[in-house]
């Protein structure tokens, strides 16, 4: 039987694939070699830039050898062109993954590698993956879904980090919340989302003072929460009276803590009370502008408000009270003193100058202030409750009408 030969002068039969010729195979191998050579050259360039940037940022070790002083930087084992560009790096002895992003190291290292920012992902052992971000990961907003938690112990959506992680916060966690930011920076929008999520919880009561009458007040008409809210500046004494009533309730709870317990467990009978203080510095300014009573005729309203808020901040945690304060600037004189400011375990700063950022987050946050002074609405720095100062984007609920609709839809109704 004679073997069949392939006639290359005729087109291949249907269903038959002609094997590639020598020239095609040579071109494919040449293209593969060129691709590997280009990638190798690219990886060498990225590695060299990485080493120089680590040396400039002091992310290195100086080793004295017989020939003199040499510099040792973290070893790069692999570079992937992406996008985004990623480097697999071995940490040196004594290094931590956070060293690459602490202070100004992250942005400067990313800029040296041609990116906008840097993300660090720990791998096994001493190995980490460095991801060079091509653009600001927080430039795109995200909407707040229509949801309501069934209990104050369930976390509400607080924001999203640069790593794409959605942060939650349960109001039963030990910690008061303070937020600062210029007008239009997004702090009120954050609280629209937070309060609308807990409006239906049977073990949460939304109380407080709001001189604007927008965050609290009319949006809560018809709910069980409205009776515990005071708005406007027409009757400053009513704000002081409300806060003093809340202090009296706190004292009552503290006096009834069960034996062998050191705090009140929230329930429908003793709910977690969220004491919302919208534009609190404005309330103090309005109270201080009123004529002071004569000696022996009472205490000035401003002093009454400061005293009540200080007590709620210092003693309220064990009685299931949480203070949520909003201010354009958390100056000590504007929020009732440095002692009051220090009681906020969870702190958020929207667009503010560098000195205001340092005021609320400490001296380590001051270098971040130059860029954050022009941050877009909804971008904030968050610190507290075991978290270092980190940049987040808060969710966007929608316009003010959507906030009112959600409160009216989910809010517990007052007894007829």
Image: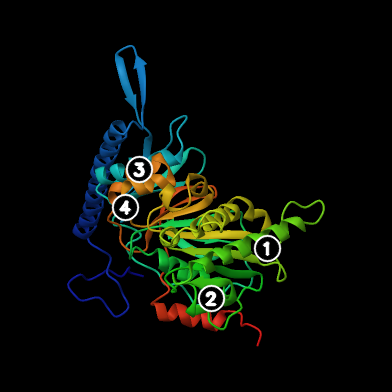
Instruction: Judge depth for marks 2 and 1 and give the one in front.
Output: 1
Cα distance in 3D space between marks 2 and 1: 30 Å
**Residue 407 in the image: above or below residue 387:** below
Please identify, in this view, whether the residue under mark 2 or under mark 4 is nearer the observer: 4
Q: Earlier in the sequence, mark 4 or mark 3?
A: 3
In the rendered image, which residue does mark 1 sit on?
249
Observer-side mark, 2 or 3, equals 3
Residue 124 is situated, as x and y percent measured from the top left of the image, at 51, 43
Question: In the rendered view, does 129 fall on the left or right side of 276?
Answer: left
* Residue occupying the far left of the picture: 9
Q: Which residue is mark 4?
A: 372
User: 409 or 306, which is in the foreground?
Assistant: 306
Question: Where does label 3 land, which residue?
Answer: 366
The answer to whether the residue labelled 2 contacts the one labelled 4, judged by CB atoms less than 8 Å apart, is no
Cα distance between the residues tagged 1 and 3: 39 Å
**Distance Cα–Cα, label 1 vs label 4:** 40 Å
Q: Residue at x 66, y 70 (%)?
A: 203
The C terminus is located in which quarter?
Answer: bottom right
Give the secondary structure at mark 3: helix
The residue singled out by tag 2 in the image is: 147
Counting other residues with Cα less than 10 Å from the Cα at mark 3, is it few (<14), some (14-19), or many (20 or more)?
some
């Amino acid at each position: 039987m004679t073997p069949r030969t392939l006639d290359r002068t005729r087109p291949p039969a249907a269903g038959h694939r002609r094997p590639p010729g020598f020239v095609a195979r040579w071109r494919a191998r040449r293209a593969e070699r060129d691709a590997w050579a280009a990638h190798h050259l690219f990886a060498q360039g990225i590695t060299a830039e990485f080493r120089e940037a680590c040396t400039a940022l002091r992310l290195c070790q100086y080793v004295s050898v017989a020939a003199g002083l040499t510099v040792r930087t973290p070893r790069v084992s692999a570079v992937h062109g992406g996008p985004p560009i990623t480097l697999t790096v071995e940490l040196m002895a004594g290094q931590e993954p956070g060293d690459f992003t602490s202070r100004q190291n992250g942005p400067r290292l990313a800029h040296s590698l041609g990116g906008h920012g840097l993300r660090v992902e720990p791998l096994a052992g001493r190995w980490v993956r460095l991801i060079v971000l091509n653009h600001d990961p927080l430039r795109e907003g995200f909407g707040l879904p229509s949801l309501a938690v069934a209990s104050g112990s369930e976390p509400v959506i607080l924001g999203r980090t640069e790593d794409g992680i959605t942060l939650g916060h349960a109001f039963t966690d030990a910690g008061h919340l303070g937020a600062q930011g210029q007008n239009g920076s997004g702090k009120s929008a954050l609280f629209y989302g937070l309060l609308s999520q807990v409006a239906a919880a049977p073990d949460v009561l939304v109380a407080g003072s709001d001189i604007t009458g927008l965050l609290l007040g009319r949006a809560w008409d018809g709910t069980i929460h409205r009776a515990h809210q005071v708005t406007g500046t027409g009757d400053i004494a009513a704000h002081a009276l409300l806060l003093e009533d809340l202090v009296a309730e706190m004292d009552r709870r503290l006096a009834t803590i069960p034996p062998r317990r050191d705090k009140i467990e929230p329930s429908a009978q003793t709910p977690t009370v969220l004491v919302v203080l919208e534009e609190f510095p404005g309330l103090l300014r309005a109270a201080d502008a009123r004529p002071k009573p004569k000696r022996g005729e009472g205490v000035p309203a401003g002093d009454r408000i400061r005293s009540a808020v200080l007590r709620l901040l210092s003693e309220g945690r064990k009685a299931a009270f949480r203070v949520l304060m909003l201010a354009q600037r958390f100056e000590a004189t504007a929020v009732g003193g440095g002692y009051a400011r220090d009681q906020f375990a969870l702190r958020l700063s929207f667009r503010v100058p560098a000195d205001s950022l340092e005021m609320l987050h400490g001296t380590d946050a001051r270098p971040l202030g130059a860029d954050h002074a022009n941050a877009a609405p909804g971008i904030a720095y968050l610190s507290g409750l075991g978290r270092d100062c980190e940049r987040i984007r808060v969710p966007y609920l929608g316009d003010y009408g959507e906030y009112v609709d959600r409160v009216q839809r989910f809010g517990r109704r007052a007894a007829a």
